[in-house]
């Protein structure tokens, strides 16, 4: 099993799309990248903690790769908007890849550069690449939110040829 930690706006939609990917064993929503210990959703959504709403993906590297997960990540959210996705605004909604080791950093830098040069997005990719820090699991009612609430809010979808 391997771990990937990603932030691409509201974690509900990001979680749901990754949950459906081949090789993904589990997806957990939480908070990372900030300074507050044991942050709550109310604190994080205020923008005062520095944390991003993020997902932690457990995946089977014999069935998918970190690179493939990142390539999917760059199609299911808009990596060209600073601190926002859809109507959500603030640093807690930033696009970020939190790497767990140097190999992940190299892959993240490579994929980001390739996506930026590909023309898939009309503006520059602003996704932050940072070292993974402490992971804080979000409250239970946020876990698998769109499974529990199929009509719930999401600003995520897989972009295709229309870009």
Image (cartoon, rainbow, N blue to C red):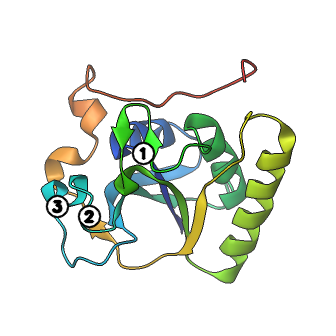
> Are there few (<14), some (14-19), or many (20+) residues within 10 Å of tag 3?
some
Q: Secondary structure at mark 1?
A: loop
Q: Nearer the viewer, mark 3 or mark 2?
A: 3
Please indicate, yes or no, whether residue 1 appears anywhere in the rendered image: no
Residue 9: give its label: 1
Q: Secondary structure at mark 2?
A: strand
Q: Is residue 34 above or below residue 57?
A: below
In the picture, the quarter occupied by the N terminus is bottom right
Q: Position of residue 136 (x, y in %)?
A: 27, 69
Q: CA distance from mark 2 to mark 1?
A: 16 Å
Tag 3 and tag 1, C-beta contact below 8 Å: no
User: Quadrant location of residue 22?
Assistant: top right
The residue at which mark 3 appears reads as 43
Please indicate, yes or no, whether residue 91 appears anywhere in the rendered image: yes
Q: Secondary structure at mark 3?
A: helix
> Are there few (<14), some (14-19), or many (20+) residues within 10 Å of tag 2?
some
> Are there few (<14), some (14-19), or many (20+) residues within 10 Å of tag 1?
many
Q: Is residue 146 above or below residue 125?
A: above
The residue at which mark 2 appears reads as 137
């Amino acid at each position: 099993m391997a771990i990937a930690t990603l932030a691409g706006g509201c974690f509900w939609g990001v979680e749901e799309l990754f949950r459906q990917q081949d090789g993904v064993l589990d997806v957990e929503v939480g908070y990372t990248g900030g300074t507050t210990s044991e942050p709550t959703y109310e604190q994080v959504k205020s923008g005062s903690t520095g944390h991003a709403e993020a997902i932690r993906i457990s995946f089977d590297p014999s069935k998918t790769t970190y690179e493939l997960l990142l390539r999917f990540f760059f199609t299911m959210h808009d990596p060209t908007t600073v601190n926002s996705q859809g109507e959500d605004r603030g640093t807690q909604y930033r696009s970020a890849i939190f790497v767990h080791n140097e190999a992940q950093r190299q892959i993240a830098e490579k994929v980001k550069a390739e996506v930026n040069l590909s023309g898939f997005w009309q503006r520059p990719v602003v996704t932050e690449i940072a070292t993974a820090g402490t992971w804080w699991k979000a409250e239970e009612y946020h876990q698998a939110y769109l499974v529990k609430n199929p009509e719930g809010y999401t600003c995520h979808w897989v972009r295709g040829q229309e870009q």
